Image (cartoon, helix red, strand yellow):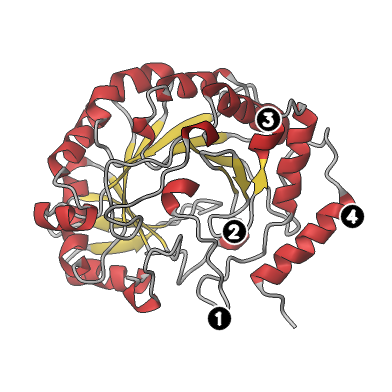
């Protein structure tokens, strides 16, 4: 009988107890041959939008300030990840990470560390773009390498409906300012079931005009966000709309590796060219190539976006725990990682953690 993801996690817990990760062992391997090298760090659960698929319109219970990791604690964990555990890329997320005033300091401290090849880790940011124009110069000076901006539609009315805020112009200003500063920018979009026929080609034209890579992300069941399988715009749906809108797609021959997006070269009818990707976590899962590990804003290690349990690093940090203890907890949690997340399978269990608390 094939174990369910939950059963696999229980097996992993027993295995990690028996094996016990060695404190001096480098790397973050799991039981299925994958090794995590990409660290997602949520620096806040707060956000200045209220996207319908992410959080309620009001009444959000934010994490208590005392529970959030301090700058020093975040930097210590990142340093251990880079120097001891093979982390080569750090992406700052939220909530909305630009709401953390010290974000530039966190970026600067991150790129001061050195990986095994004596190079700094790649420092990346995922943001909704609001206020990015005012922070770009400082972030670039701090060493930020790349930025992903979340933008589901370029139609002002639909943007206001989806995000519950009328702030599209601020997002576009942030994107254009980042481009002018020389930052590589990608756009992340979650297509909406009622408007994707219009939004997908409009977003693609917006990105081709600016030389931006566009990545569509399937709607995922995270944190009681009203997910339904029939509300998910699938990879096939997206590709169909792109081609029906007159764009020509050629699948990218570049090896995908652990990148979550399956990519295509795209050409418009008027000759503009670019790249478009689809992150199809629901209908075309890529779990076997996953290289991610996650640190939540309140100091929990998650081995998967859809994990049903976490490992508490904050308690270790605040009780005077050694670097070896942090390594052991982190490695132990990665050994509990399931082979598959099981989102599209019967019996899938949502952890109840909202995306704003987990980090994108």
Q: CA distance from mark 1 to mark 2?
A: 16 Å
In front: 136, or 69?
69
Marks 1 and 4: CB-CB under 8 Å?
no
In the image, residue 145 lies at what x, y percent? 42, 29
- Which mark sits nearer the N-terminus, 4 or 2? 4
Which residue is under mark 2? Answer: 307
In the image, residue 169 lies at what x, y percent? 13, 40
The mark closer to the camera, 4 or 3, is 3
- Which mark sits nearer the N-terminus, 3 or 1? 3
Q: CA distance from mark 3 to mark 1?
A: 38 Å
Quadrant of the image occupied by residue 267: bottom left
Q: CA distance from mark 4 to mark 3?
A: 24 Å
Which residue is under mark 3? Answer: 317
Which label is found at residue 212?
none
Which residue is under mark 4? Answer: 18
In front: 120, or 77?
77
Q: What kind of element bears circle 3? A: helix
In front: 69, or 97?
69
Q: CA distance from mark 1 to mark 4?
A: 30 Å
Q: Crowdedness of circle 3 by 10 Å Cα count: few (<14), some, many (20+)?
A: some
Q: Crowdedness of circle 2 by 10 Å Cα count: few (<14), some, many (20+)?
A: many
Q: CA distance from mark 3 to mark 2?
A: 22 Å
The residue that appears at 21% across and 28% down in the rendered structure is 177
Q: What kind of element bears circle 2? A: loop
Which label is found at residue 346?
1
Q: What kind of element bears circle 4? A: helix
In the image, residue 124 lies at what x, y percent? 44, 34
Q: Quadrant of the N terminus?
A: bottom right
Marks 4 and 3: CB-CB under 8 Å?
no
In the image, residue 170 lies at what x, y percent? 17, 37
């Amino acid at each position: 009988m094939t174990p369910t993801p939950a059963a696999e996690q229980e097996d992993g817990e027993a295995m990690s107890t028996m094996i016990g990760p060695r404190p001096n062992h480098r790397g973050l391997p799991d039981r299925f041959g994958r090794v995590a090298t990409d660290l997602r760090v949520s620096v806040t659960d707060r956000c200045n939008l209220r996207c319908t698929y992410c959080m309620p319109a009001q009444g959000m219970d934010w994490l208590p300030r005392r529970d959030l990791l301090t700058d020093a604690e975040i930097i210590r964990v990142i340093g251990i990840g880079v120097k001891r555990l093979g982390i080569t890329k750090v992406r700052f997320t939220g909530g909305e990470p630009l709401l953390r005033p010290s974000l530039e300091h966190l970026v600067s401290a991150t790129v001061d560390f050195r990986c095994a090849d004596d190079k700094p880790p790649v420092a990346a940011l995922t943001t909704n773009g609001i206020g990015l124009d005012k922070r770009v110069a400082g972030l670039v000076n701090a060493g930020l390498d790349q930025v992903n901006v979340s933008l589901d539609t370029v139609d002002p009315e639909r943007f206001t409906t989806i995000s519950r805020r009328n702030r599209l112009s601020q997002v576009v200003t942030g994107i254009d300012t980042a481009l002018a500063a020389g930052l590589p920018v990608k756009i992340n979009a979650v297509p909406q079931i009622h408007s994707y026929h219009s939004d997908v080609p409009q977003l693609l034209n917006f990105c081709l005009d600016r030389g931006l890579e566009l990545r569509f992300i399937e709607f995922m069941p995270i944190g009681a966000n009203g997910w339904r399988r029939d509300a998910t715009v699938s990879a096939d749906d997206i590709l169909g709309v792109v081609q029906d809108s007159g764009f020509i797609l050629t699948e990218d021959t570049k090896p995908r590796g652990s990148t979550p997006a399956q990519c295509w070269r795209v050409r418009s009818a008027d000759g503009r060219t670019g790249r478009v990707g689809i992150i199809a976590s629901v209908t075309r899962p890529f779990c076997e190539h996953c290289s991610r590990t996650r640190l939540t804003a309140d100091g929990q290690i998650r081995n998967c976006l859809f994990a049903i349990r976490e490992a508490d690093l904050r308690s270790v940090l605040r009780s005077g725990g050694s670097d070896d203890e942090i390594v052991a907890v982190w490695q132990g949690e990665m050994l509990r990682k399931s082979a598959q997340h099981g989102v599209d399978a019967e019996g899938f269990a949502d952890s109840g953690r909202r995306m704003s608390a987990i980090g994108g």
